[in-house]
Image (cartoon, rainbow, N blue to C red):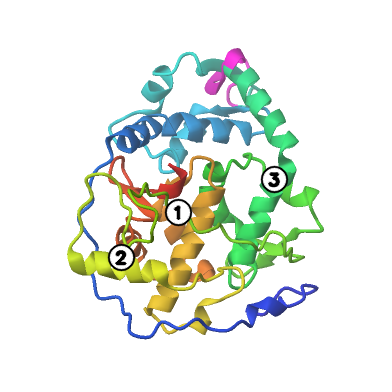
Amino acid sequence: MSAPSGLHANPSRTCKKPSYKGLSISCSAPKIVRDVSLDKHVVKQSRIRFVQKLKTLLLSKPKHYIPLHILSKCRSYLSLTKPCSIRSMIYRYPSIFEIFPMPTPPSPLNATKPYYQLCVRLTPAAAALAAQELRLQSEISTDLANKLQKLLMLSSHRRLVLSKLVHLAPDLGLPANFRSRLCNDHPDRFRTVDTSYGRALELVSWDEQLAIPLPTPKVSRELIVDRPLRFKQLTLRKGLNLKRRHRDFLVKFGDLPDVCPYNTCLEEFAKESVEAEKRACAVVREVLGMAVEKRTLIDHLTHFRKEFGLPNKLRGMIIRHPELFYVSLKGLRDSVFLVEGI
């Protein structure tokens, strides 16, 4: 796929390859040690996922309501499995959703009797909060546009399919109408184009000020004496014990030169090499750093494996680096947190 027209190649992408002699990925993923507080947070978010998705669906409609018979076709999007009914789920949240009858025009077969269909909408209080949220998102539209531009700058072809971005948008704090409003409000940054994979967002301009990766997290150690440590140490979460071989690998991995994910691409490194893993970790850090809660689902990252140059065994790579990421097994799908953002 060719580079987007009108976008000049970034000269800094042709950079010197760092040296990784004598280091290979030879350790397997460790056993996950639970973090109770983060797991509780994931469980709480899982319980309100239905609320968030139905709210997004309602706000995407012009009149902000949906007939129940149409909503029944959205079970997969709402993550509802049988025998749980949509109506019973709606009744669980009476302060957020309400079901009401909507009259419909009479049909030729039933012209004498009025016909009503049941619909769902937000309650007045919930609708007011949703409007307030949209106003706040409008006030920070520049920051949200920066996130979209950075994501496009991370991608190999400077182009991301919108149907994939929809999955990641809530974690980034993007509004439900980001495709029609945010994308169109910044034509100098990106534009929507048709591709063989569907409608996509394409980068228009490169911004060097945005192409600055997250700084390496600083580790503060309280030393008894004011002198450098004799041996390299690895700072991990409390209760996390790794095999010596794995610890040695992570210590050496951390000592390697940083790889800028904006100025390097996957083709510069050998497949499944430590160079590629260094860059992949940097990409995941960037995406999680943009997230509101510094977390997302691993499945959401998996959608962008090809676009971001991530490995096929992405979950294994993330678990292999507990110094950078924490994986929670709670909920229907695994979540990943950025450790430095916790």
**17 horizontally vs 8: left or right:** left
| Residue 106: % across, % down | 64, 22
- Please give the name of the residue rendered at 52% of the width and 71% of the height, measured from the top-left corner: 259
User: Residue at the location (27% across, 32% down)?
Assistant: 83
Task: Say whether disc 2 or disc 3 marks the residue closer to the N-terminus.
Answer: 3
Q: Specify start and end residues of the magenta stretch as a single range.
A: 109-125
Query: For mark 3, what is the residue?
Result: 143
Checking the image for residue 292, the label placed there is none
Kind of residue at badge 2? Arg
Q: Which residue is mark 1?
A: 300
> Considering only order in the chain, which callout, 1 or 2, is on the residue closer to the N terminus?
2
Circle 2 residue: 230
Residue 58 appears in the picture as rendered = yes
In depth, the one of 104 and 89 nearer the eye is 89
The image quadrant of residue 208 is bottom right
Image depth: mark 2 or mark 1 in front: 2
Identify which residue, 27 or 75, lies in the foreground: 27
Which callout, 1 or 3, points at the residue further toward the start of the chain? 3
Packing grade of label 2 (10 A; few <14, some 14-19, many >=20) is: few
Q: Is residue 36 left or right of residue 180?
A: left
